[in-house]
Amino acid sequence: MPNGNSWVSDLQRRCDIHQHKQSQLKLYDFEPQRHTFRDEVLQGLQDARKELPSKYFYDDTGSCLFEQICALDEYYPTRTELSIMREQISDMVDLLGPNCLLIEYGSGSSTKTRMLLDALQDQAGYVPIDIAKEQLLRSVAALTALYPALEVLPVCADYTGDFALPSPTKFVSRRVAYFPGSTIGNLDREPAKRLLQQIAKVCVGGGLLIGVDLKKDCNILHRAYNDSQGVTARFNLHLLKRINQELDANFQLDQFGHYAFYNPRQSRIEMHLVSLSDQVVCIGNVEIAFKLGESIWTESSYKYTVEEFARLARAAGFTVERVWTDAQQLFSVQYLSVV
Ligand code: AVI
């Protein structure tokens, strides 16, 4: 596994480009700085309604916990999306066409991507973008071993922010973004529209292959975010542990409880950490007071109907070309084009 010493860094175009000494692999590094994390945490916890940005779940441990969630029986999105991909991969690849540059937003372990990489022809390259640097480097190392001919250009960034995309050396017929997992659902409507607009600009003349979770029986949703093994609770609480470790804070993890429920009026799962006592927490030298029962809102996960998502996609400049779903209509994978 790469560590700080085995990478040489060079400041270029507003980001660090690290090159591994042995492998020639470059990392385009726009990782958010620690002071950004601190500022966003303090701002979120000093608001009248306390909240923390869900993107900060994904440090190395948080990403591993999320991988464990994806493997749970109760968490239907991952296996359902994978089964849709497995069944429809040839259709999908036909729409993407040859020589496309695949740009993945939130690449994680790149598991679903491998299906695309196996089926695509003469790919121009693969640009995985992720905020979790170590997981990104691990999955890129695994991918380059599996696909030695593929040019992989990893970008460590918060993809909702500003960063420049690297270009491959091969000819690119079109740029296609890949945004699986219904991660779009973790953004409120306006930020979701802004991100889709940003992707539409990057992919003019190409498109976006996206996973979108669908509205369904609330009990299925409830079980998916309140699993019996408590993995989702650990994932949620890990955010406080990360703040303790990185920002010199003293959250007592046993003084907060995981609370997730479906809000049908807003069509979203809301995930919270609820204070189990009156308490004061220090983050560095800043004191934050919590009342018994007060919550920190840590994540929203919006669920859409196919029609609702089509409206959002159109508002961002896309045309919905294809929608694939499973037999129970739990989840959808959609191909959107942009001219
Ligand atoms: C990454 N994202 C799509 C997941 C979701 O379902 O909203 C994150 C997650 N949170 C709790 N479980 C899974």
Image (cartoon, rainbow, N blue to C red):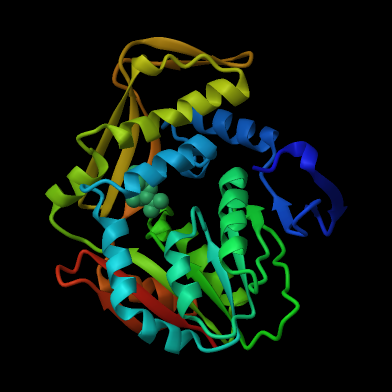
Residue 41, picture quadrant? top right
Which residue is depicted at the point 46% across and 74% down?
A: 116
Q: Is residue 67 above or below residue 284?
A: below
Q: Quadrant of the C terminus?
A: bottom right
Q: In the rendered view of the protein, which quadrant contains the N terminus?
A: top right
Residue 300 in sight: no
Where is 59 relative to 275, above or below?
A: below
Most foreground residue, 316 or 204: 204
Left or right of 29? Residue 126 is left
- Residue 290, percent from left and from top: 40, 17
Is residue 78 shown left or right of residue 290? left
- Asked where in the image residue 78 lies, by quadrant, the reply is bottom left
Residue 49 placement (x, y as % from top left): 41, 32
Horizontally, is 14 left or right of 310 in the view? right
Image quadrant of residue 111?
Answer: bottom left
Q: What x and y, as percent, mark residue 159?
A: 59, 57
111 w.r.t. 270: above or below:
below
The residue drawn where x is 49% and y is 54% is 109
Say how many tags the image has.
0
Question: Depth check: 158 or 69 in front?
Answer: 69
Can residue 130 be seen from the camera position used here? Answer: yes
75 on left or right of 97: left
Residue occupying image coordinates x 32% and y 37%:
232
Residue 38 lies, in percent from the top left, at 62, 30
Please name the residue shown 72% across and 55% down the image: 27
